[in-house]
Image (spheres, grey):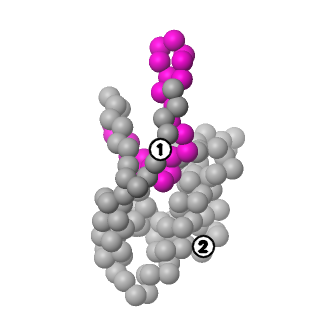
């Protein structure tokens, strides 16, 4: 996931753009509709703010908003988590915890050895 500022959207702008409340956003997070690792904390001149990967979060919010009249949030969360379970992914475990990346979101993987030599790994999702 490319986390450059141009690929991020602030929580404030997201809430304004879709006319959703802070409470709704965090309810969706608690229900598993929005993954924890999409909440990116960054230092700004005004303090710490939350940002999201723009393409991922806007697609997900639009999906939630389009389905919320027809489907219960719990049912939608089950459907989304089931789909994500079946997607190809890389799971990286470190002493700091585990991080999951879906292959469709990865642009490049470079393994860099202790001498600084990088080896690029090509990703092909079936």
| Residue 58 seen | yes
Residue at left 36%, top 37%? 92
Q: Nearer the viewer, residue 53 or 116?
A: 116
Residue at left 54%, top 67%? 59
Q: Which numbered disc, 2 or 1, marks the residue that appears first in the sequence? A: 2
Q: Secondary structure at mark 2?
A: helix
Single out the mark in the foreground, 2 or 1.
1
Image position of 116 with respect to 122: above or below: above
Image position of 111 with respect to 61: above or below: above
What residue did someone put label 1 on?
123
Residues at circles 2 and 1 in contact by the CB criterion of under 8 Å: no
What residue did someone put label 2 on?
18
Residue reaching furthest to the top: 115
Image position of 26 with respect to 79: above or below: above
Disc 2 crowd rating (10 Å Cα; few below 14, some 14-19, many 20+) is: few
Disc 1 crowd rating (10 Å Cα; few below 14, some 14-19, many 20+) is: few
Residue 110 x/y as whole percent:
51, 31
Residue 21 x/y as whole percent:
53, 70
Residue 39 x/y as whole percent:
49, 51
Residue at left 30%, top 65%? 82
Residue at left 60%, top 64%? 14
The question of residue 101 being in magenta is answered with yes
Quadrant in the picture for the C terminus: bottom left
The magenta segment is: 97-118
User: Along the horizontal axis of the image, is 46 left or right of 61?
Assistant: right
| Residue 39 seen | no
């Amino acid at each position: 996931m490319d986390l450059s500022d141009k690929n991020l959207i602030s929580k404030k702008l997201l809430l304004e753009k879709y006319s959703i409340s802070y409470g709704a956003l965090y309810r969706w997070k608690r229900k598993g509709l929005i993954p924890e690792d999409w909440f990116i904390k960054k230092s700004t001149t005004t303090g710490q703010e939350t940002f999201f990967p723009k393409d991922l979060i806007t697609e997900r919010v639009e999906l939630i908003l389009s389905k919320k009249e027809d489907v219960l949030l719990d049912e939608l969360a089950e459907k989304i988590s089931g789909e994500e379970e079946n997607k190809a992914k890389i799971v990286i475990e470190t002493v700091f915890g585990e991080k999951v990346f879906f292959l469709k979101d990865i642009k490049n993987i470079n393994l860099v050895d202790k001498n600084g030599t990088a080896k690029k790994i090509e990703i092909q999702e079936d």
